[in-house]
């Protein structure tokens, strides 16, 4: 009997590429890109411009890397897999870094990308049947290693929480709740103020989803009267905290006085407790209605704003604990002031009181503490010796007495935890207001993904400002894909009332109802294809899918034979 030894031709890690490609096809992304960015006159290769960018997005989302010079080698390693997915040849030079850089220039130049966003929004909402009643808006900054080119350029020095020593640009985004999916993205100079960025974001969302009946949630920078009036004029609703520019400290005290006197009834907001345990109170508050008038596009707009004064229990406790820490620090520093330290001169009364004032201002407790410095004289007798008469030496030292103003401290603590939210949605209950604003962390999660792992926008080494803008737009599409994959699985688990098991490495029994997209895609990394030759015939072998991988395909509503179809389309010949 003759035994023919199989010959291994090649192995390719397929991983999450079929799932990602299926998602891009659902979004109709390649065709949408080709519609708004037609092929240039001398375009070469079998792939259209939209397909080139789609393959780059596969690399970005799958590898967590947006570096241009890493793409071509990756395509070479996955060439036959990509060819099977696109049903046409894919050559590594199709994704040369020069071609990708030109793509960034096209994305960042002009307004075509905003038209792409509009088409993607409409397609996404229709295909995934997404709720569109709540949109969140926020801004962030991103630093760059490039130099400031001009006073009108994108890169500028401005207030930065990341690195104030490097120039930055600013990103404004409107995202769809509860996914956190980007709907509209704008890139502006790093020294731009936030207030004027909200109206353009709202306009972009309205162009995609329509006008009226939608709630926009933002931070206190969204609370500019012009922004609130613009939202109200379009028949939409806003929800944002009001800063002291809109409602002064004295006005807040006047509104809260009935609460402190015990004459104002407060509504409660609770979180369900564990089984058998009472609900946990998280907030309480009340509202007042105010009639507002403003001018929008030369027309007077009138509306009723409901101002909710809300006290968060957790926020109040945190503020009170922080106050006690500052008081303790100030008291300790004040009592240590008179202590003589090596190499330091002794402080006398005037100097002690000046230093005490500095400490209390630094800890922001000057109205809550008072102190007095008292001189203490001690006499020390020295006996005579060797014919010297006995003497008496007088030393002067100081003691500081610190007193707490308990009444002022108590009044300060009762003011803590309160926030004022403004909304023209007078039908919103206190519970809806509290939980709607507390969901603002979802857009912060987007910023973490965009600027950190897995998309890694910063630190940014691109020098061309147009390409920087184009890269932000490209990564916003990658962020859209991640949020959709994550939301679809979480929503499926919620409807089933079940949890996902087997997604944590080294913790096979650990379950979760809210897996991240990165965790889900990581589950697919073990899938590979092998091409072998037996007796002159070529065969493609797919590694068996695990139970959790099959369940993910079901949750994503993808064909169970998605990977099997790939083997049938896998090129059988040797790669050149």
Image (cartoon, rainbow, N blue to C red):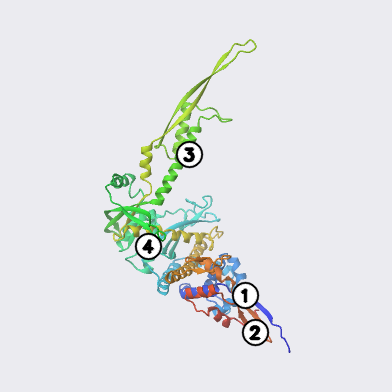
Question: Which class describes the residues within 10 Å of circle 2: few (<14), some (14-19), or many (20+)?
Answer: some
Q: Distance between the residues labelled 1 and 3?
A: 61 Å
Disc 2 on helix, strand or loop? strand
Q: Distance between the residues labelled 4 and 3?
A: 46 Å
- Mark 1 or 3: in front is 3
Looking at the picture, how far across and down is residue 563, in whole percent? 55, 78
Disc 3 on helix, strand or loop? helix
Of the numbered discs 3 and 2, the one sitting upstream in the chain is 3
Of the numbered discs 2 and 4, the one sitting upstream in the chain is 4
Disc 1 designates what residue? Answer: 12
Q: Is residue 207 visible?
A: yes
Q: Can residue 49 be seen in this view?
A: no
Labels 2 and 4 touching (C-beta < 8 A) = no
| Residue 381 drawn above or below residue 255 | above
- Mark 2 or 4: in front is 2
Of the numbered discs 1 and 2, the one sitting upstream in the chain is 1
Question: Which class describes the residues within 10 Å of circle 4: few (<14), some (14-19), or many (20+)?
Answer: many
Q: Residue at x 36, y 38 (%)?
A: 407
Looking at the picture, how far across and down is residue 473, in whole percent? 48, 65
Q: How far apart are marks 3 and 2 (CA)?
A: 76 Å
Labels 1 and 3 touching (C-beta < 8 A) = no
| Residue 149 drawn above or below residue 539 | above
Disc 4 designates what residue? Answer: 202
| Residue 70 drawn above or below residue 153 | below
Disc 2 designates what residue? Answer: 538
């Amino acid at each position: 009997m003759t035994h023919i030894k199989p010959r291994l031709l090649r192995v390719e890690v397929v991983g999450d590429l079929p799932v990602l490609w299926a998602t891009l096809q659902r979004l109709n992304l390649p065709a949408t890109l080709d519609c708004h960015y037609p092929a240039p006159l001398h375009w070469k290769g079998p792939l259209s411009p939209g397909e080139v960018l789609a393959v780059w997005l596969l690399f970005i989302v799958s590898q967590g890397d947006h570096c241009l010079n890493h793409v071509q080698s990756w395509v070479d390693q996955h060439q036959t897999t990509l060819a099977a997915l696109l049903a046409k040849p894919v050559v590594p030079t199709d994704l040369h870094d020069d071609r990708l850089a030109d793509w960034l220039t096209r994305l960042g130049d002009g307004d075509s990308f905003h038209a792409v966003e509009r088409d993607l929004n409409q397609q996404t909402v229709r295909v995934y049947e997404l709720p569109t009643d709540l949109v969140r808006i926020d801004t962030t900054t991103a630093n760059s290693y490039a130099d400031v080119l001009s006073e009108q350029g994108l890169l500028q020095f401005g207030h930065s929480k990341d690195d104030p020593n490097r120039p930055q640009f600013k990103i404004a985004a409107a995202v769809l709740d509860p996914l956190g999916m980007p709907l509209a993205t704008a890139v502006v100079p790093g020294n731009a103020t936030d207030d004027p960025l909200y109206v353009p974001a709202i306009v972009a969302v309205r162009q995609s989803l329509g006008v009226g009946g939608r709630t926009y949630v933002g931070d206190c920078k969204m609370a500019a009267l012009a922004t609130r009036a613009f939202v109200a004029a379009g028949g939409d609703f806003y929800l944002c905290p009001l800063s002291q520019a809109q409602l002064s400290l004295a006005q807040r005290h006047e509104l809260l006085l009935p609460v402190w006197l015990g004459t104002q009834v407060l509504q409660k907001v609770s979180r369900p407790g564990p089984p058998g345990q009472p609900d946990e109170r998280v907030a309480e508050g009340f509202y007042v209605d105010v009639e507002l008038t403003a001018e929008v596009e030369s027309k007077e707009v009138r509306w009723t704003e409901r101002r909710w004064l809300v006290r968060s229990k957790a926020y109040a406790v945190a503020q009170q604990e922080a106050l006690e820490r500052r008081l303790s620090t100030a008291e300790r520093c004040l009592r240590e002031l008179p202590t003589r330290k090596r190499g330091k001169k002794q402080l006398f009364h005037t100097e002690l009181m000046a230093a005490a004032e500095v400490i209390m201002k630094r800890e922001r407790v000057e109205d809550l503490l008072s102190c007095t410095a008292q001189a203490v004289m001690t006499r020390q007798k020295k006996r005579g010796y060797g014919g010297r008469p006995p003497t008496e030496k007088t030393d002067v030292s100081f003691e500081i007495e610190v007193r707490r103003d308990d009444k002022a401290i108590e009044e300060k603590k009762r003011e803590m935890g309160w926030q004022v939210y403004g909304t023209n949605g007078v039908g919103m209950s206190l519970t809806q207001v509290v939980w709607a604003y507390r969901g603002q962390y979802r857009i912060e999660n987007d910023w973490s993904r965009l600027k950190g792992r897995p998309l890694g926008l910063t630190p940014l080494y691109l020098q061309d400002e147009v390409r920087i803008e184009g890269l932000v737009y490209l990564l916003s599409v990658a962020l859209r894909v991640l949020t959709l994959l994550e939301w679809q699985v979480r929503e499926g688990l919620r409807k089933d009332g079940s949890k996902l098991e087997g997604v944590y490495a080294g913790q096979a029994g650990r379950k979760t109802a809210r897996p991240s997209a990165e965790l889900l895609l990581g589950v697919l990394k073990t899938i590979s294809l092998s091409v072998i030759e037996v007796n002159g015939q070529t065969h493609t072998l797919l590694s068996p899918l695990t139970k959790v991988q099959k369940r993910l395909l079901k949750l994503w509503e993808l064909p169970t034979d998605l990977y099997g179809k790939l083997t049938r389309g896998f090129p059988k010949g040797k790669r050149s």
